[in-house]
Image: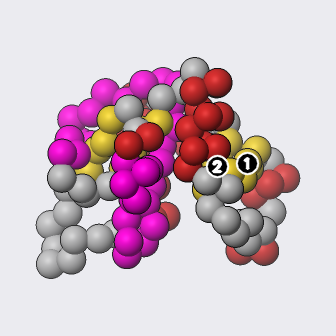
Amino acid sequence: ANAFNVSGVHIVGKRDWNKRGAMVTDRYLTVQHHATIAEFKEWADKSGVPIVGIDNVPGSKELESAALPESCVLLFGQEGAGMSEEAIAACSVLYAIEQYGSTRSMNASAAGAIAMYHWALQHLPR
């Protein structure tokens, strides 16, 4: 996330995030934990930031042609299970990353990198 100059990362779920695996990300990037999707949505609404979902669920638009808002928060589903119905409902819009192989899922960190790169191409100077 830091490679794309994002202002922060939000972890949603009952468990806190694994700081050890994050390579001290919290020292140079704001990391916030939200216990539930409802809590996360409340934060986004109060902050005036739309939630943009990234998952290959029915009704998702193509990320490749998306004009992402400069100020937004990207939400990714769990690997395997994807986004919950509650998470989908919290999103202002849903985008899917086109996949060409035989599987219909992608590692969350890979999806995050692709989506953040797409955002960076639109909003960061080159």
Picture residue at 18% right of the left edge, 45% below the top:
59
Q: Is residue 92 above or below residue 48?
A: below
Q: Is residue 71 above or below residue 61?
A: above
Amino acid carrying label 2: it is His
Question: Which label belongs to residue 10?
Answer: 2
State if disc 2 and disc 1 touch (CB < 8 Å). Answer: yes
Determine the residue located farthest toward the right in the rendered image.
27
Q: Is residue 102 found left or right of 54 in the rendered image? A: left
Q: Within 10 angstroms of label 2, few (less than 14), some, or many (20 or more) residues? A: some
Question: Which label belongs to residue 32?
Answer: 1
Q: In front here: 93 or 9? A: 93
Q: Within 10 angstroms of label 1, few (less than 14), some, or many (20 or more) residues? A: some
Question: Which label belongs to residue 60?
Answer: none
The tag earlier along the polypeptide, 1 or 2, is: 2
Residue 81 at what x, y percent from top left? 38, 71
Q: Secondary structure at mark 1?
A: strand
Amino acid carrying label 1: it is Gln
Residue 80 showing in the rendered view: yes
Residue 37 at what x, y percent from top left? 55, 49
Q: Quadrant of residue 23?
A: bottom right
